[in-house]
Amino acid sequence: MQVKKDSDTRIKFWTPLRVVSTLVVLVLLATFGVSSCNSNDPPSRRSTSNLPALPAVVLDTEMRSASGNSIKLSNYAGKVVLINLWATWCGPCRMETPELVRLHKEYQDRGVEFVGLSTEDPDASAQKVRDFVSQYSVGYTIGWATREVALTLMQGQTSIPQSFIITRDGRIKKRIMGFHPQRTPPQLKQALEDALLDG
C-alpha cells in the first residue's frame, strides 16, 4: 500500500500546469542565454572555423570547362571564390548573369575568382553554353558541375540559380538561392566584402 501512495504522489506532482510551466521556464532560459551570447560576443570577422567547409567531393572533382580545360575547385585554395550553379534554360539565371559579369569585373583585381557551373549535361549543352558565354560576354570560368558536385552543393534544394561565396580557407560564407534584381546583387556584394575581410 505504501508503494502505491508514493506512486500516486509523484503522479499528482506533475500536473499538466506544472509540465507547461516547466517547459515555459526552460524555453525562456534558453532564449535569454542565446540572445545574451549573441549580443555580448560580437562575431569575429577573422574566424571562419564555425562556417561549413566545402566537402572534399566538391573540392577535388575534376569538371569540364567551356574552354576545354578542367576545373578543380581545390586549385582556388587561398582565394575568395563565388561559385554559381546555373543553366542556359533558366530564366532567373539569364537575369542574374549580367550582374555576375559586372561583379566579376569589379572584384577580379582584388583576387576574387568566379566559377559558373552549369547543371546541364555537358555533351548535350556544349554549344548552348558556348553561345551563352558569348552572348553575355562572360569573362569568368564557366563549366559543368558533375551530378555529384551539384547535388552535394544543393543539399536537397535543387532550384537554380544558387551562388556560394567561399572564403580563402574553403568555407561557405554565404549561400544565395534564386535571383531578385533588387536584393540579390547587394547580397552578393556584401558577402564578397565579408569574405575578403575574413583574412
Image: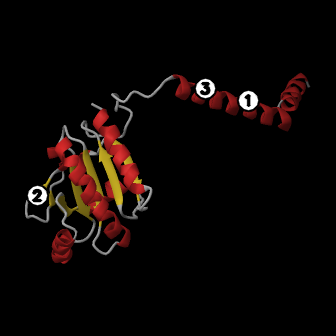
**Quadrant, the N terminus:** top right
In this picture, residue 189 sits left or right of residue 73: right
Image mark for residue 70: 2
Measured as percent of width and height from the top left, residue 15 is found at 85, 34
Residue 99, compared with residue 136, is above or below; it is above
> Crowdedness of circle 2 by 10 Å Cα count: few (<14), some, many (20+)?
some
Circle 1 or circle 2, nearest the eye: 2
Looking at the image, residue 66 lies above or below residue 188: below
- Considering only order in the chain, which callout, 2 or 3, is on the residue closer to the N terminus? 3
- Name which quarter of the figure residue 111 lies in: top left
Residue at 28% across / 37% down in the picture? 196
Q: CA distance from mark 1 to mark 3?
A: 12 Å
Give the residue type at disc 2.
Ser
Estimate the x, y position of residue 177 in percent, counting from the top left: 41, 57
User: Of the numbered discs in the image, which one, if any, rests on residue 25?
Assistant: 1
User: What residue is shown at x 29% (from left), y 64% (from top)?
Assistant: 97
Q: CA distance from mark 3 to mark 2?
A: 49 Å
Which of 113 and 148 lies nearest the eye of the viewer? Answer: 113
Q: Residues within 10 Å of mark 1 (few under 14, many from 20)?
A: few
Task: Find out whether the residues at labels 1 and 2 contact each other: C-beta distance under 8 Å.
Answer: no
Q: Which numbered disc, 1 or 3, marks the residue closer to the eye?
A: 3
Occupied quadrant, residue 144: bottom left
Give the side of residue 125 with respect to residue 50, left or right: left
Instruction: Check the image and name the residue furthest to the left.
Output: 68
Name the residue at 20% across, 73% down.
135
Q: Earlier in the sequence, mark 1 or mark 2?
A: 1
Which residue carries the number 3 mark? 33
Residue type pointed to by label 1: Val
